[in-house]
Amino acid sequence: MHEASANRLDRAAPPRVFYGWWVVSASFFIQFMTAGTTFYAYGVLLKPLSEDLGASRFAVGSALSMLTLVGSIIGPAIGREVDRRGARGMMLLGTAFMSVGFLLFSRIEGVVGLYLTFGGVIAIGTALLGPISNTALVASWFHQTRGKALGISQIGVSLSGMVMAYLATWLVTEYGWRGTVVLFAAVPLVLVAPVVATLVVNRPEDRGLLPDGATVAPESVAARPIGPVSLRVAFRERDLWLIALLIGLNFAASGSVIGVIHSHTTDIGHSAARAAAVLSLLAGMAALGKPLFGSLSDRISPRSAIAVSMVLQASGLICLMLAPSFPMLLGGSLVFGLGCGGLIPLFGLLTVARFGAARLGHMMGATMLVMLPFQLLGLPFATAVFDRTGSYDPAFSTFLGLYALAVLVLARLPAGSVEE
């Protein structure tokens, strides 16, 4: 009887849905709420904050740069802890930082308080809930379909830009910026923390599973290196610098174009409504680009996929520069958005391909630290060029040069993978 029961258990069908996809859905939601209440909502808060605090928009806007700066500085430490202990604990800690930070933010009376709360406490929480933790988490659950899984999980970042900006505008109109920020303080504890506690499991082994729901561990997964390395050792990796330069050049160009495309559209004679349509289409195509490029990288390698991404970005940018008609602007934003949408998942996929999943968090954190100048200087460069020339076209031409330089860097990056 016992033998018969055992045989029935052996023949039991596996779960219809691999648990890793629940982890992907949790990551999608976490990134949607985190990016929405920080990066995308801050643009809505900028003007009322400036007026209430009696500070310039440059001073208020600098808090967003501080958030990026702090996240990059502490990124290696977060990555090391994620590799050692898993993402779940880091994420729960991040929800606490964000909730406390938003509550303190709602009570500030000057720019110093803004920097300490949004650029300090909230920045730490955002980093703990950000791309390092989520990429390492999802990558540990998948091997054969890792690109697809990462792409789907990161759609939340782009969709939050399409939804949260409108929601934040309504909240500020109804409750003021302080009331809006108080509501944002509830989001991490009331919405995000339960999702982390309920759905996030650090690794498939913690549930007696294997990546992709496989029944036999792939040889490449079984043989991968264990544990992170020191930051000094990480910086000795030539491929880390190549990936940082490659992705950094792309981020400098794409982030700047996204930041100025609305004003560029109105500058060449179109209405604000048409400019919003151009930006919205770009964001929507970026959301679509994440799973598309993730799935593409599963078939042709991350290295080849990012080459396709850069061709699309450069082609779209040329259309945005040279075609003043509204249909061509829409076409340019469609192509550009699709191309730049793949950058975040491809960053993680390139890193895991070169260094393995066991070191992904730490190596991503070290790479983000190297990329910091690109993330901080692209948009100020574009706005400075406009102030001097009255047009963004010279900056766009420079960005085309950055894409060409990135192609040369990509050619130096080895084609092989530690997990091939």
Image (tube, grey):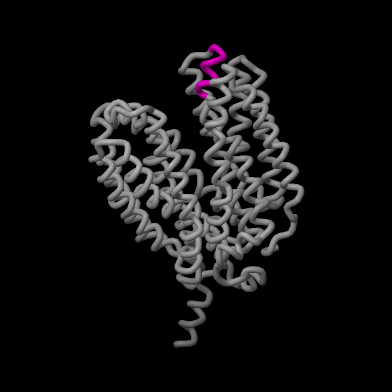
Left or right side of 76 for 124: left
The residue that appears at 53% across and 26% down in the rendered structure is 383
Residue 267: within the magenta?
yes
Q: Indicate the quadrant where residue 169 lies.
A: top left
Q: Indicate the quadrant where residue 35 lies.
A: top left
Is 84 in front, or is 71? Answer: 71
The residue that appears at 45% across and 57% down in the rendered structure is 22
Count of labels in the image: 0
Position in image of residue 264 (x %, y %): 55, 20
Is 303 in front, or is 93? Answer: 93
Can residue 211 be seen? no
Left or right side of 368 for 106: left
Residue 260 lies, with reference to residue 233, above or below; the image says above
Chain part drawn in magenta:
262-269
Residue 232 lies, with reference to residue 372, above or below; the image says below
Residue 371: within the magenta?
no
Q: Indicate the quadrant where residue 62 lies.
A: top left
Can residue 382 be seen? yes
Is 118 in front, or is 91? Answer: 118
Quadrant of the snapshot with the C terminus:
bottom right
Q: Which secondary structure type mostly characterizes the magenta part of the structure?
A: helix
The residue that appears at 35% across and 42% down in the rendered structure is 115
Position in image of residue 409 (x %, y %): 72, 46
Left or right side of 294 for 315: right
The residue that appears at 35% across and 51% down in the rendered structure is 192
Position in image of residue 378 (x %, y %): 56, 35
Position in image of residue 148 (x %, y %): 58, 51
Quadrant of the snapshot with the N terminus:
bottom left
